[in-house]
Structure formats: structure tokens, C-alpha cells
Amino acid sequence: MRILILSDGRLGHLNQSIALAKYLGYEYDIVEVRFKSRFLKSITYLLDRCNILSKRVFIADVKKSYNVVVGSGSTTYYAVKTLAKDMRAKSIVMMLPRGYRYDFDYIFSQSHDNAPKYKNIIEIPANFAYVEPKGIYLSNRKSIAIIVGGDNSIFTISKERLKSQLDFIVGYYDGYDIAITTSPRTSKEIESLVESYHFEYEVIFSKNRVNPISDFLEQCEVVFITGDSTSMISEAISYGKSDVVILPLDSKKDNKFEHFIEDLQKDGYVHIYNDKIESKNSKIDFRKYLKGVTL
């Protein structure tokens, strides 16, 4: 069996679909999908309510038939449903497809989305994640890691607040190697702050586009993560033995992402930094959420 994965171009979304395929043990092909215009995307919500599925509104270079079609992100949902029906394939989406009818074969929905209790909706505590160390980062000493994200529509990384957090970490883990990586969304200001510390290992993503996070999870005693990325947090709580500490950020409003992190803390997966460190390292086995999936 081979899976068709539809991508909206966002790596955090794509990785959830790839994780599903890897846990299932199936080969997969990735095809990018996009709507021909914003207007056509907007009318797909109405078309879907009317049970009208048309390949004319989107572009996806699919050259063969598949048994399963998977997608994550709003650009993929209508195409997943349309192509699956055309191929008589199973349709799976990795996030709650708000605005569309929930008549996919399977929907994986994060707990903080408060999805309705339908038979085809499988509630999961975090984003599907599959971690494979790459050998980018290697350390022969005691080490901790820091993963720094960036601003988004909800969170803002304050230079002053992050500096205070980093100063605490440096003092608390005296004698440890400290490894750090920034991300595609990290601002130049925050990258400059990171570089000023001269950590034992650092990846400044704008200068070196590699991803050592899986190696951090494999080797480091503690992994600190800024609270802006559910994808990075999901990876950290699904692999390795590291304690996971979330560095809280400034947020513009009450939001489901902070509730997501708070729920993970209650269940022992993470500790939210509060001027002290607590050991939290429970891990999610995503395979258990596939027991009822029949393809």
C-alpha cells in the first residue's frame, strides 16, 4: 500500500502526515496542492456543504492512484476529500478540518480543539510526530538543549524575557554543554542574542539550515523549547528520555495553544518554566492511536 500525502507547503503540517505514514509502515509520495485563487478556496466551504467535489478549483500534480490520501492544513482538506472520492481511497486529515464537513474516513484532532465525539474523530494530545536522529549533533559530555522559535499571530518572543531565561539556564547548568538552535521564524534580534552567549553548540538557522532537534532529544538530559510551536513540543514529548521544559512567551490573548501546554504539564509531559526547573519526561506513543484505524 502506498499513501498520497498532500502538502500545503508548511513543514509542520507536512511532518504530521509523514509521521502517520511512518507509524503505519507504508511508503508515501508527497504532492503539493494549492488553490487556483483565494476566491476558489473560499467557495470550497460552500461546495463541500453542498456535497460538490471538484478538482477544477485546485492544482495537484497527481499522476497515479492511491489507496489512502492524507493531508494537514486548510489548503489540503478539500483536495483530500475530492481526490480520495475520485480514487475510491480512504481520506485522512491530521488536524480538525474546521469549516468543512467532518465526513472523512479518519480525523485526528488535538485535544485542545474540543472536537465533537464522532466515531471517525480520533482525539490525540499533541500533533502526530515521528522522530529520527540524524547525527548532526554529537556530545560526549552532559548536555542540555534549547530550541528557540519565533513570533507568530499569537506569541511574541521578547528579547528581555528570553535573555532572563537564558541567563538562568546558563547559571543552573554550570558544567554542562549547552546546545541551541533557532528556527525559520526566529528574528535577527533574537538570533543576535543567541550568538552573544557563545554556546558550545549552536545552529543559527538563517546561516545554517539544518535541524538538530532529533539529536537533542536523543542525547540531552533536558530540552528547553519556546512555547510558540506545537510541532516542536510534540516531537519532544514523543521521543527520547529528556525532561522537557517550556519557556513561556508573551501572548496577545487567551488562546488554545497555552491551554495545550498547560494540559501537557498536568499529564506530566512538560514543565512550564517558572523560575525553577522540575523533571517532566512522560512520552506519548502515537502508535496506540492507530489501533482502530483500518485501511
Image (cartoon, helix red, strand yellow):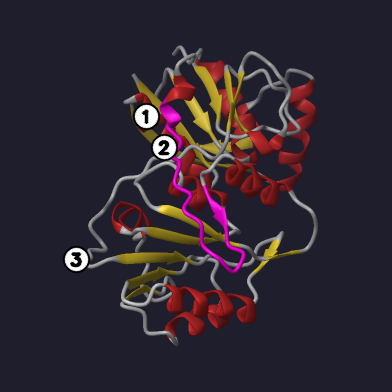
Outermost bottom residue: 196
Q: Secondary structure at mark 3?
A: loop
Please name which of the two marks, 2 or 3, marks the residue nearer to the observer: 3
Residue 138 image offset from top left, x and y in percent: 22, 63
Q: Amino acid at mark 1?
A: Tyr
Which secondary structure, mark 1? Answer: helix
Q: Where 139 sits versus 113, above or below? A: below
Tag 2 residue: 18
Q: Nearer the viewer, residue 70 or 34?
A: 70
Mark 3 residue type: Asn
Which dot marks residue 23?
1
Query: Which range is magenta?
Result: 270-287
Residue 8's quadrant in the figure? top right
Prevailing secondary structure of the magenta residues: loop
Q: Is residue 255 shown above or below 162?
A: above
**Quadrant location of the N terminus in the rendered image:** top left
N-terminal label among 3 and 1: 1
User: Which of the two discs, 2 and 3, labels the residue nearer the N terminus?
Assistant: 2
Considering every residue shown, the one lying at the far left of the view is 140
Query: In this orientation, which residue lies closer to the viewer: 256 or 243?
Result: 243
Identify the residue at horizontal 49%, vertical 53% (top origin).
Answer: 232
Alpha-carbon neighbours of circle 1 within 10 Å: few (<14), some, or many (≥20)?
A: some
Residue occupied by mark 3: 140
